[in-house]
């Protein structure tokens, strides 16, 4: 259960930071066309929700994954530990963020996704031991442990994006007197 605890800690830290941001800062989009903090949060939630939907939908269907999948997963995880910008693969457009959702709505959605994961985590880890449960568009097949590691490093990766947003939007925070 420590992987789930780590995911919850990461989520809490991110939401805590956002709680101190003004609405205009949360909605700020960089000039380079990057995502706002709210869009980034929406993307994180969509990614978790979609991966879990695939895992639940495929429950009972076991896929073998080989050394190539494991190696590609390790490489993706290593890449996501860096601040290098990465585009969402076109085959994963369902996780692209929408517009217009507020922090409270997104926070509630994320709580729902995580609650569903928490209710099923033990069963998923046990029933999928040694079998692939999700096929990432870049890394290939992952077992449930790799999925949880990916979700964690995905948050780490977007932490770099958040740092860039924090710097770029600093003038909004200063202008509001906060």
Image (tube, rainbow, N blue to C red):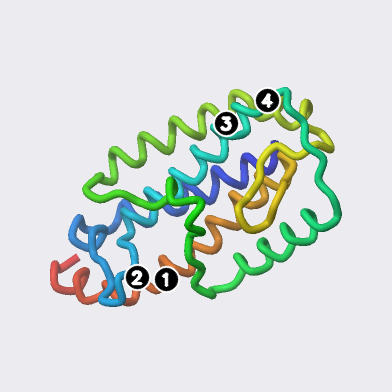
Graded by Cα atoms within 10 Å as few (under 14), some (14 to 19) or many (20 or more), the crowding at tag 2 reads: some
Graded by Cα atoms within 10 Å as few (under 14), some (14 to 19) or many (20 or more), the crowding at tag 4 reads: few
Graded by Cα atoms within 10 Å as few (under 14), some (14 to 19) or many (20 or more), the crowding at tag 3 reads: some
Tag 3 residue = 117
The numbered dot on residue 59 is 4
Query: Height in image: 171 above or below 125?
Result: below
Tag 1 residue = 163
The residue lying at 20 percent from left, 55 percent from top is 23
Quarter in which the C terminus is drawn: bottom left
**In terms of sequence position, does the residue under pointer 4 or pointer 3 come before the other?**
4
Query: Height in image: 79 above or below 18?
Result: below
Tag 2 residue = 166
Q: Residue 33 or 36: which is nearer the viewer?
A: 33
The image position of residue 39, as x and y in percent, is 33, 55
Q: Residue 48 or 121: which is nearer the viewer?
A: 48
Camera-near label (1 vs 4) is 4
């Amino acid at each position: 259960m420590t992987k789930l605890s780590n995911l919850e800690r990461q989520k809490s830290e991110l939401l805590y930071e956002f709680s101190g941001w003004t609405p205009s800062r949360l909605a700020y989009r960089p000039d380079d066309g990057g995502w706002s903090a709210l869009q980034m949060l929406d993307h994180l939630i969509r990614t978790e929700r979609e991966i879990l939907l695939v895992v639940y939908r495929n429950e009972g269907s076991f896929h073998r994954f080989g050394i190539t999948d494991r190696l590609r997963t390790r490489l993706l995880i290593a890449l996501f530990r860096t601040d290098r910008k990465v585009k969402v693969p076109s085959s994963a457009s369902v996780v692209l963020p929408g517009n217009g959702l507020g922090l409270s709505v997104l926070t509630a959605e994320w709580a729902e996704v995580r609650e569903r994961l928490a209710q099923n985590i033990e069963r998923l880890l046990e029933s999928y031991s040694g079998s692939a449960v999700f096929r990432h568009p870049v890394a290939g097949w992952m077992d449930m442990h790799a999925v949880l590691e990916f979700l964690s490093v995905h948050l780490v990766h977007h932490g770099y994006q958040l740092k860039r947003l924090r710097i770029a939007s600093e003038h909004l925070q200063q202008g509001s007197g906060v």
